[in-house]
Amino acid sequence: MHCCEPRRITEAIWACLGAGLLLAFHLVPFPEALGAVTKGYDVYLFLTGMMVLAELARREGVFDWLAGIALRAAAGSRAQLFTLIYLLGIVVTTVLSNDATAVVLTPAVYAVMKRAKGDPLPYLFACAFIANAASFVLPISNPANLVMFGNNLPPLLPWLRIFLLPAGAAILATYLTMRLLFRRTLQDEVPNISRGPSAFDRRQVDRAWRHRNSRSALVLFGHR
């Protein structure tokens, strides 16, 4: 991560600095730059809505609650827990965007696994890679879809006809690959937690969430 953030400065600062230099050296005319910025207002509104929704869910403990449910439902099986976390990542990515999975769900999973005294690595990888693999299930699954397609974004049914099968194949291939890579780790067991995350766990999630956001300006976890 340090190679992407010289002197611990987030990517957003460097991006803004680069844009400012383009304007300062007249490499891009100011009216053209302003037009490009204002043209994406619909994307900005969408991103704002998704971030507000994800933040409300985080503040109410939805994500750590769901991760806790997955841990209890796994009944001590690491392999089953991996599958449940992966399925949860698919749902969150599909309906809330891959940013929500990478930035909000991942710290929740980490906090719950630390509480269970289990190795969080396979489950963090699951969150990271499903945020990428499931990012074409719906147009809203990845905000970059809106930027890339612009005014030519297909309606929902044509989108599903085009992308549902490839997205499903990517999700399945990613799952099988990670199960193979972590096959030894997933053979062990984790304690079966009988109750949801405590207030201490919520504080762990908050700290992890703030740390994650301090290192990225809601750019997907390096996996766009």
Image (cartoon, helix red, strand yellow):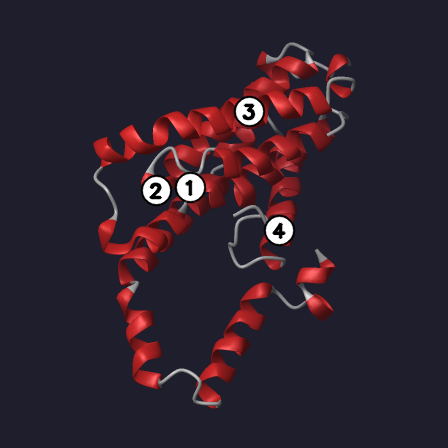
Neighbour class for label 2 at 10 Å: few (<14), some, many (≥20)? many
Q: Earlier in the sequence, mark 2 or mark 3?
A: 2
Q: Earlier in the sequence, mark 3 or mark 1?
A: 1
Residue type at numbered disc 1: Ser
Mark 4 and mark 1 residues within 8 Å of each other at the beta carbon = no
- Give the residue number, with chain letter if any, for mark 4: 212
Question: Which mark is on residue 140?
Answer: 2
Residue 206: where, in percent of width, then height?
A: 60, 46
Mark 2 and mark 4 residues within 8 Å of each other at the beta carbon = no
Which one is in front in this view, the residue at disc 4 or the one at disc 1?
1
Gap in Å between the C-alphas at discs 3 and 4?
27 Å
Mark 2 and mark 1 residues within 8 Å of each other at the beta carbon = yes
Please say whether residue 71 is visible from this viewpoint.
no
Gap in Å between the C-alphas at discs 2 and 3?
22 Å
Question: Which mark is on residue 97?
Answer: 1
Question: Which mark is on residue 173?
Answer: 3
Residue 139 relative to residue 108: left or right: left
Gap in Å between the C-alphas at discs 4 and 1?
17 Å
Q: Earlier in the sequence, mark 2 or mark 1?
A: 1
Q: Earlier in the sequence, mark 3 or mark 4?
A: 3
Gap in Å between the C-alphas at discs 3 and 1?
20 Å
Indicate the secondary structure of the residue bearing disc 2.
Answer: helix
- Determine the residue positioned at 65% across, 53% down: 211
